[in-house]
Amino acid sequence: MKLFEPYNIAGKLELPNRIVMPPLVTRLATNEGEVTEELMDRYLLYARGGVGLIITEAVSVKKQKSGPLLRLSEDRFIPGLKGLVDQIHDASNSKVAPQLIHFLKISRSGYRQKVEDLTLEEIRAIPQLFAEAACRAREVGFDALELHFAHAYTMSSFLSRHNKRKDDYGGSLKNRLRLAQVVVERTRSAIGDNMVLGARMNGEEFTLGGNTLKQSREIALSLAGLGLDYISITAGGKFEDAVARDGRALDPYTTGYSGHRAMPPAWMPEKVNAYLCADIKRTLDRQGHNPTMITAGRIPTASVAEEVLEAGDADLVAVARPILCDPFWPRKYHEGRDKDVQKCIYCNACRDMDAAHQKVVCVQWKRKNGSVAPPQS
């Protein structure tokens, strides 16, 4: 199967296969953003399970309160992440990258900071935050680096048609792209040409008045033109159609149609978002750009992933919840042990645990004796 063949990103990074574990929140870091043994064990499971490229849960580039979220906003976070990366490399041939994120303030009172609220000084500081975090990531020993330009967060919000700023950072697509372009340029300068640099972006926002494929094609063309080595296509996950819940901060994933497109539930078709990646991939090809393209969104089995690759809709396939459900998903399918795979039922209980700020596990890990543990190899 193509899925289990080695793959090289931009002549810089050899992956053992075409399977990606995309960012999936664990809530296993400390409230100060430090790596814990439990978090390390989770990522080692993915590595031993045979994933080609592990992209960590989002890692904050800014000093701010953010609960159990990994961080690279200060040098003090380097040793813990270095320990994580070293253990993954020692345990497997999996490669690993952090997903760097900048996010705005949000509270359970209902307050949500928007890009329109930022001063020019605050905006112009963002590229340097990414660049400094990228330097730390390189020092840690990560194999690649991903910029989070998707869903409800700062960078995606600048790119979105929902951005209502009236200055050089809002309005036209050219203006909305300005910050992302500088972030890519500064980050590349910080890490050099030899380290793989990618970005995750929405193929469509699935909100009224938000970005559609028309805008996403142009965004991808701009980012590819800056020399990104890969582009990972996701969808939705926006605040604009999220439904408020008493006593909880607004969550872009748990309610609203865009949230469903970000984490497609069982009632949605298999590979529901693959067409977005396919469209953008072909758009880039026609313009002479060929970054590695990654797709995601309800890809439950190796055979479905293979269909995507054989159709040329993507170069790599990201599989999140099924690998959470059974971390040995890649190895079992590769060895022909399809019947041994514990199948994800797309109930999204894991998503709900994240929204409730609980440690994220799969509900199918519960055993008859009351313990909670993932399947074995």
Image (cartoon, rainbow, N blue to C red):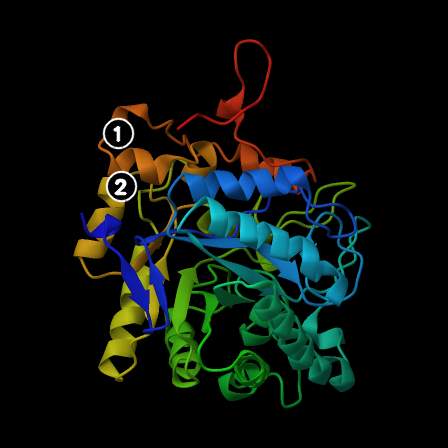
Q: Callout 1: helix, strand or loop?
A: helix
For image coordinates 58% across by 43% down, the residue present is 254
Asked if residue 282 lies left or right of residue 121, the reply is left
Q: Is residue 2 above or below residue 50?
A: below
Q: Position of residue 228 (x, y in %)?
A: 42, 77
Asked if residue 310 lies left or right of residue 67, the reply is left
For image coordinates 45% across by 50% down, the residue present is 261
Disc number for residue 255: none
Structural crowding at the residue carrying mark 2, measured as other residues with C-alpha within 10 Å and reported as few (<14), some (14–19) or many (≥20): many
On the question of residue 74 being in view, the answer is no
Earlier residue among tags 1 and 2: 2
Residue corresponding to mark 2: 302
Q: Quadrant of the C terminus?
A: top left
Instruction: Inspect the image, locate mark 2, and give the three-letter code of the amino acid beneath it.
Output: Ala
For image coordinates 60% across by 75% down, the residue present is 158
Structural crowding at the residue carrying mark 1, measured as other residues with C-alpha within 10 Å and reported as few (<14), some (14–19) or many (≥20): some
Contact, CB < 8 Å: mark 1 with mark 2?
yes
For image coordinates 53% across by 44% down, the residue present is 43
Asked if residue 204 lies left or right of residue 43, the reply is left
Q: Callout 2: helix, strand or loop?
A: helix
Towards the viewer: 278 or 115? 278
Q: Position of residue 175 (x, y in %)?
A: 56, 87
Q: Position of residue 232 (x, y in %)?
A: 41, 63
Residue situated furthest top in the rendering: 369
Residue corresponding to mark 1: 338
Instruction: Inspect the image, locate mark 1, and give the three-letter code of the amino acid beneath it.
Output: Asp
Towards the viewer: 233 or 261? 233
On the question of residue 194 being in view, the answer is yes
Residue situated furthest front in the rendering: 90
Q: Position of residue 340 (x, y in %)?
A: 31, 24
Distance from label 1 to label 2 (Cα)?
9 Å
